[in-house]
Image (spheres, grey):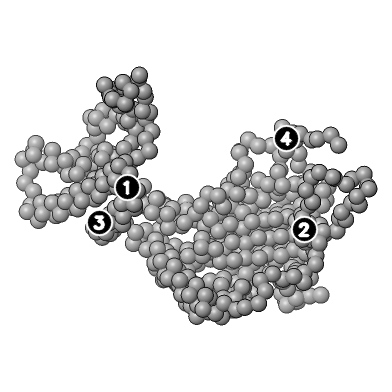
Amino acid sequence: MQGPLSAWLVKHGLVHRSLGFDYQGIETLQIKSEDWHSIAVILYVYGYNYLRSQCAYDVAPGGLLASVYHLTRIESGIDQPEEVCIKVYVPRKNPRIPSIFWVWKSADFQERESYDMLGISYENHPRLKRILMPESWIGWPLRKDYIAPNFYEIQDAY
Amino acid sequence: MIVNMGPHHPSMHGVLRLIVTLDGEDVIDCEPILGYLHRGMEKIAENRTIIQYLPYVTRWDYLATMFTEAITVNGPEQLGNIQVPKRASYIRVIMLELSRIASHLLWLGPFMADIGAQTPFFYIFREREFIYDLFEAATERVEGVGVVDVKEVINWGLSGPMLRASGIQWDLRKVDNYECYEEFHWEVQWQKEGDSLARYLVRIGEMVESIKIIQQALEGLPGGPYENLEIRCFDREKEPEWNEFEYRFISKKSSPSFELPKQELYVRIEAPKGELGIFIIGDQNGFPWRWKIHPPGFINLQILPQLVKRMKLADIMTILGSIDIIMGEVDR
């Protein structure tokens, strides 16, 4: 089922796929990685001026990685703001997504954190380096197939 | 018996090491060992002009800073026979005496604490605040420092008091209507200027509003149960029977756990520091598939390099304090 934003994008001929609504009724769209930068600018012009949260997660072990963006419009004193959730799926072997730092600056630290934890590299990000882990760390901790180095647990024999 | 009272003390005297010779409880001799905070101020002074040296002098006696600056200035004046105008002299005297009061107040607190009375330690800071206000009016510390424009604030994704201090009336308690905030009468605190003073005023105003909300909530507290006993959403794993292989006779019974449906959701709340959010993706068991924390301090910290450009070094602490971050949530 399509929401209003999805219908507007179809009217303007922009390639996307609608993923329905999430639990609270927020419209979710899937955008391809190559189109993401242009659609981000279009959404900014449409009125979504606040990147609320940028997150990334692992869809399935051995599967794709997803980068999720929550956008909303901030104005003084409104009730029920419009919100939309955009997902960009990338393959695990070569995860590259255009950075939207130049559209919404609040993606600065958040994209660095997604890079640090899952290895999705954002092109054209001004300083894409590890932010929470030490800079010489190897591996992407939040992937489901990550093995923590030197981690042993004592197990009781049954 | 020779005892070492090491460099760190429970009270605020700084780093001083004492080697004390004791005979039972009587003290025979005491040898102080200094030098733990030696920074080479005198050697540095030989290579700086007076104006360049002034920031160093405040670091000698850091509780009565005006005196150190006064003596740094008096020395060359008297050496060069420079006349000081009367008005300047009066102003200096006012600042110096205020600084003397501040220093004595800050002596009084730890002195009482050393003797055993802990409470005056806190009261002296309250008295010192009045003096700080006067110093601030003379040196203009908080106003106009760290100004953020409205469009910049939205673009950088800031939230909480930083957003409201730049002129946008956006408070998630009013916008999202969660919990039962719409039943109370309260106002969103906001200011227009966007500098540190505006953020300070927003936070003080929010404290007053919180008191109003608490009073209204206490008056209108409804009766009824406080647990929702109808929810039955337990974890799918069955407990093993008593004669199965997996049954544990000795360890404790695991409590029933809540099963998260296979949905995703972004919940948010107006924390004091900004918008705190959780993005949960549930799997059909008790553990979430992804639990992403959106901390306000992490997001608000992004704007720091832009705010401190073209400000003085001492303003960095003012700006950092007005952004109000706490490293626990920034780093997680």
- Residue B36 image offset from top left, x and y in percent: 34, 29
- Residue B198 image offset from top left, x and y in percent: 39, 66
- Distance in Å between CA atoms under marks 4 and 1: 49 Å
Mark 3 belongs to chain: B
Which residue is under mark 1? B117
Task: Name the residue at 26% across, 38% down.
Answer: B60
**Counting residues from the N terminus, which is met first, the one under dot 1 or under dot 2?**
1
Circle 2 packing at 10 Å, graded few (<14), some (14-19), many (20+), is: some
Quadrant of residue B42 in the image?
Answer: top left
Q: Is residue B216 left or right of residue A61?
A: left
- Amino acid beneath label 4: Phe
- Residue A151, numbered label: 4
Which residue is under mark 3? B131
- Residue A157 image offset from top left, x and y in percent: 84, 34
Q: Residues at marks 2 and 3, common chain? A: yes
- Residue B276 image offset from top left, x and y in percent: 59, 61
Circle 1 packing at 10 Å, graded few (<14), some (14-19), many (20+), is: few
- Distance in Å between CA atoms under marks 1 and 3: 23 Å
Q: Residues at marks 1 and 2, common chain? A: yes
Task: Name the residue at 9% across, 36% down.
Answer: B79
Quadrant of residue A47 in the image?
Answer: bottom right
- Amino acid beneath label 3: Ile
Task: Name the residue at 78% across, 52% down.
Answer: B254
- Distance in Å between CA atoms under marks 1 and 2: 49 Å
- Distance in Å between CA atoms under marks 4 and 3: 55 Å
Q: Residues at marks 2 and 4, common chain? A: no
- Distance in Å between CA atoms under marks 2 and 4: 27 Å
Q: Is residue A61 left or right of residue B144?
A: right
Which residue is under mark 2? B257
Q: Is residue B160 visible?
A: yes
Q: Nearer the viewer, mark 2 or mark 4?
A: 2
